Image (cartoon, rainbow, N blue to C red):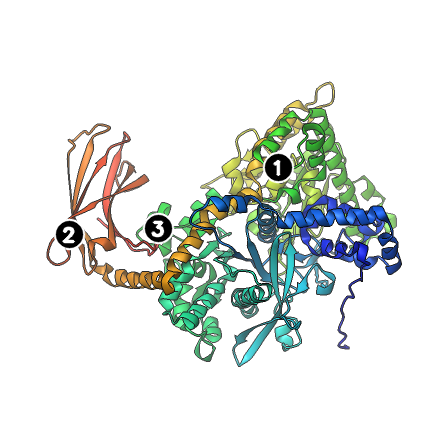
Amino acid sequence: MKAIRRFSVRPVLPAPIAALGELAMNLRWSWHPPLRDLFASIDAARWDAVGHDPVAMLSAVSPEELERLAADPAFVDAVSRAKEALDRYLGEDRWYQQWGREEADGVPSAIAYFSAEFGITAALPQYSGGLGILAGDHLKAASDIGVPIIGVGLFYKTGYFRQSLNRDGWQQEDYPVLDPDGLAMSLVREEDGTPGLVTIALPGARQLHAHVWRVQVGRVPLLLLDTDVRENDDAGRSVTERLYGGGGELRLQQEMLLGMGGVRALRLWSRVSGTPTPDVYHANEGHAGFLGIERISELVRAEGMTFDAALEAVRSATVFTTHTPVPAGIDRFDASLIELYFGGAQALEGVPVERLLALGAETYEGGSSGMFNMAVMGLRLAQRANGVSQLHGVVSREMFDGLWPGFDDDEVPITSITNGVHGPTWVDRTVFELARTHADVHQLDTQESWESFATVPRDAVWAAKRAMRSQLVAEARRRTRQSWLERGASPAELAWTDKVLDPDVLTIGFARRVPTYKRLTLMLRDPDRLRKLLLDPDRPVQLVIAGKAHPADETGKQLIQQLVRFADDPEVRRRIVFLPNYDIAMALHLYPGCDVWLNNPLRPFEACGTSGMKAALNGALNLSILDGWWDEWFDGKNGWAIPTADGVEDPERRDDIEANALYDLVESQVAPRFYDVDEQGLPQNWLSMMMHTVTTLGPKVRASRMVRDYTQQLYVPAARSGWAKADGGYAGARDLAQYKARARAAWGDVHVDHVESSGVGDTPELGETLHVTTYVSLGDLTPDDVEVQVVHGRTNHHGDELHDVASVPLAHVEAYEHGRHQFAGDLVLRSSGAFGYTVRVLPRHDGLARPSELGLVANA
Ligand SMILES: *Cc1c(COP(=O)(O)O)cnc(C)c1O
């Protein structure tokens, strides 16, 4: 093979329309239709041919055409108005700036957001599924509300993969190579114009170098590291070739690059752009965990801090989000691999490999001693952590409770912020049009704007839904035909694809990645029953299905094949389609076109799920297992809950029960309601559910709500903790590290020795006061080093568990010899029923976010 080096030549734009360049390079167009219209207005056919990608569009226009456009006053005017609008969007104060001014204690001036994948637009395919789309939506919403985030990720030359099917319905993967010069990205350069280079050390005296691309997502810069550079050997160049492409060692190299290289890329960026360095670091899932190690090393080198003090400084300003409720979903490495990459001559200055290994060690029941766990490290390196729905918060606290032994799951320091989706990206234009025409609402960004849908006439709503369903039908036909051509069919055999699906039939969508727990084939549990639903003469149902299996996941590919084989049957193929290559471009047709969005994961393995939110914003009703977000926001009127067979151990039986419940619901409730129309042809009861869904879920499921929650609940507190630790030459961090060392060393001698109470009789009444006195041993700790609490709550009939717990601190009364102390206080009985209490001793220090943080407790 010849070593051909290829590159794209960017067009030279004539001065009057030069702003088109910036308009194409800022991905704001991906959620701002007027900008897309501007590019489409150059030539609609070519706009379709380039896949609605402005950068590709500009390359496709000849210099002569550009000159003609530059001489067209109407077009020149449209360009300058678009540029003015973009500049206003980029420069004006938004929610964060207004809110931040009221915050006397200050707000962060930059927040780094690390993620292994980012799904922003189909034109930049750097995602595999929900995690990436969420990260993309996070950046877009941050831009819209002015939160100063800087994204950090990797640039994968072949993205994830393109999915197609072979004749047998088996998934095929292609890896089309992306040309960075043809994408909306620009190289981060040093002041002298040379490309900035980030380097990390690999074993065997190898170095891994990367360039840094900047993608501009509205106001938010996204930095992507790319190892396909001349300075690397062949192996190094391919480190960022594919997303989730390699196992073990390659994955470790990618994650080192993301975490450590990502911090170095941020330093490069702030140096050359003159922008502030981040006050807060957010690791979106465990992949980026090494960012904490890099920052510890920075502090040890620059500030002469100990590892422990640096750890405290780093932890305070770090946020970790976990996204998986399945231990198998977590990245783990052999401890020996970590030793190879971080031990001996490889050790990062200030980070002894034993300390690193301890951060990722699975030191809990069921953990394995030879493994290094990225999520565990993420939790140990972040003072604040969260799951992504309320239920996932509960599941995460249980899953990781081994890291905080002695505490009830409720007190495990992992909170939750429920995911959201970016409205301007995911709400179809038809829906915006409805709001504009009938409710005079121009932006769907407030509670009131969504509630205004209640005033839109129902015939207009139904006509809009039919229009969106028809668009999906047309798209599904096109894709089905394309897929059959790729499967080897000849055009002459494919006339039937023009009759696939019907714009007036109840349309159920199901699209997602295909890990086993999502149960792609649950609907096939009873094929005859499914066939009957599809072919019902009066109330037929049609199914649009899509999803990619990970290339190494043979089981997932088998599931896809089963489904494709069912859908290939000429008897049903006009009512059920599997569309290959689920991605953002397809999703933008799917959600608006569906009447019902189906989700049937194995509860509780869906951490949140976001596709159902996107469908809901477009007036689809959810039909879902009560998992993830649906467990939280299903209200009985916005869709249907598929009952779960919780507690049934046999998975086959459980699937049978849940599949039957699904068929029952479709037969007895969903289809009858959809087809129950009045004399004007309007399904009034269905429309009531649609209107209710849009008006009540609209405000909640938005990514701007999510980013605001992250900002107020996690970023700002983390920034303030970080500043408190950094003040006075990091005195706060050093002090906290010393305190922790002291508390850990002394804790073996901390006991509750004796508890006494008085003030109430055998049958106390509400409002009476219980006086509690306790004698504790504190070893070498002082009374100020600890909090002694009465913990109280409802108790079960065994009296061995407390629920709805609350605590009351007790005051120090007297010190005795040998580290013994008396504490006492009052507790007012405020709820009736079975009541229980106990006493415990916890660490206390201003630098702790929560007393459970150290995992130390002495219970009575
Ligand atoms: C929203 C979205 C997902 C995630 O959907 P889940 O419901 O979380 O599984 C995956 N892929 C694409 C293309 C999406 O748009």
- Secondary structure at badge 2 equals strand
Numbered badge on residue 821: 2
Indicate whether 453 appears above or below 168.
above
- Residue kind at label 1, given as amino acid type: Ala
Indicate whether 405 appears above or below 643.
below
One can see residue 30 in this view: no
Q: CA distance from mark 2 to mark 1?
A: 59 Å
Circles 2 and 3: CB atoms closer than 8 Å: no
- Residue kind at label 3, given as amino acid type: Arg
- Which residue does the numbered mark 3 point to in the structure image? 850
Q: Position of residue 149 (x, y in %)?
A: 55, 54
- Which residue does the numbered mark 1 point to in the structure image? 616
Tell how many labels. 3
Q: Quadrant of residue 495?
A: top right
- Residue kind at label 2, given as amino acid type: His
Q: Position of residue 320 (x, y in %)?
A: 47, 55
| Left or right position of 859 against 591 | left
Upstream in sequence: badge 2 or badge 1: 1
Q: Position of residue 508 (x, y in %)?
A: 67, 38
Circles 2 and 1: CB atoms closer than 8 Å: no
